[in-house]
Amino acid sequence: MEIAERLTKIPPYLFMELRKKIGAARAAGVDVISLAIGDPVEATPKSVIDELCRTAYDPENHRYPTDEEKGMLAFRQEAARWYDRRYGVALDPATEILGLIGSKEGCHHFILARINPGDVVLMTDPGYPAYRASILMGGGEPWNVPILAKNDYLPDFADIPTDIAKKARGMFLNYPNNPTGACATKKFLNDLVVFAKDYDIAICYDNPYSEILFAGQERISFLMAPGAKDVGVELNSLSKPFNMCGWRLGMACGNPDLIAAISKVKENTDSGIFNPIQFAGIQALKNEEAFIEGMTALYGRRRELVLATLKKIGIDFAPPRGTFYLWVPVPKGMTSLEFTNRLFDRTAIVVAAGTAYGKYGEGYIRISLTLPDDRLAEAMARIEKEFAP
């Protein structure tokens, strides 16, 4: 049976390949520790689970979801209050917020809502691989914008040729950034709005790590920039701040025309978000901000352990201050893949090679902090033993 040609352009999804590799090793009896996948292991807050259970018993919630194409109005209203409280951003729940089955869905629907076949879409290199897949499945043409350490992993708009900028119809950005951990500045966001207006480029600002920040880093939303709602949308998610990855709940916020277009894609794609999940999301947004602070403190302690271990083996660097990832330079004389393979073969530790995120990821690996403390300590002990001078 022949498959659609569009699928032949898409490389294997990084995390599915990693899961297969881990599964095969564990089946062979190897004690594998994965530092590759960003999936929190701590439980979702109890009050959120309780709200899911309570509302799941109501037969009214067993029917098609309320306001299926946009998400429950009560959820959108709570998301608006959350954005006002956390970022000082005012949003109209009726026209400027759309409920999503996770922010990843929003990336894909943004392409279908904005991009025509052959349109250029800008994305960063290194960057989250799913952006490229969404662009290709929507018939767009991805164009890589390098983000480099010398620029604090922020794009230099001067690197984008004028002819490419004129052809571009969309741009994916993600700060705090996966994989680098870099954070945007208000000046950068102001410049981004000007750039987008100059070339009529719709911005899809994917912001699921907005709350995972370390000492000295200001919490920033793209929508804080003057004119941001004129040029784009911001995607956010409850996955990372509230340990709700598997619940699949997020939101798109911003430009009303883009929100309406993404909503039209959604209403012809799925039947909305299960009501009890939305009620649980309301509980999280309204009452569990302290949980975010606790998780950030936990990630901070784990981060310091990893940095101290890397320093012992000669890898000393000042990491950016966002996400629960570390973007780690590999030892001199080794490529990203060589270091990744050595870690796996000699210590049974899995990390993500930087080249999985683009050619400018060469020379780096990504380490995730989302595993139990004892397993992280064991991983660091293995690394220190293998690479100690």
Image (spheres, helix red, strand yellow):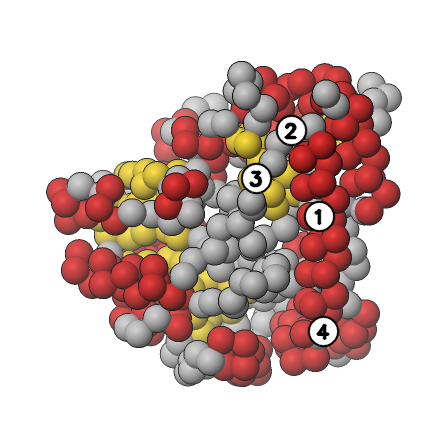
Residues under labels 3 and 1: Cα distance?
12 Å
What kind of residue is marked 2?
Answer: Gly
Do tag 3 and tag 2 residues touch (Cβ < 8 Å)?
no
Q: Which residue carries the number 2 mark?
A: 314
Q: Which mark is residue 290?
A: 4
**Which numbered disc, 1 or 2, marks the residue closer to the eye?**
2
Which is nearer the N-term, disc 3 or disc 1?
A: 1
Do tag 4 and tag 3 residues touch (Cβ < 8 Å)?
no
Q: Residue at x 33, y 64 (%)?
A: 187
Residues under labels 4 and 3: Cα distance?
30 Å
Q: Which residue carries the number 1 mark?
A: 304
Pointer 3 local density, CA inside 10 Å: few below 14, some 14–19, many at least 20: few
Q: Residue at x 71, y 32 (%)?
A: 312
Pointer 1 local density, CA inside 10 Å: few below 14, some 14–19, many at least 20: few
What kind of residue is marked 4?
Answer: Ala
Q: Describe the element under mark 1 as helix, strand or loop.
A: helix
Q: Which residue carries the number 3 mark?
A: 317
**Depth order, front residue of 52/314:** 314
Give percent across and percent down for residue 305.
74, 44
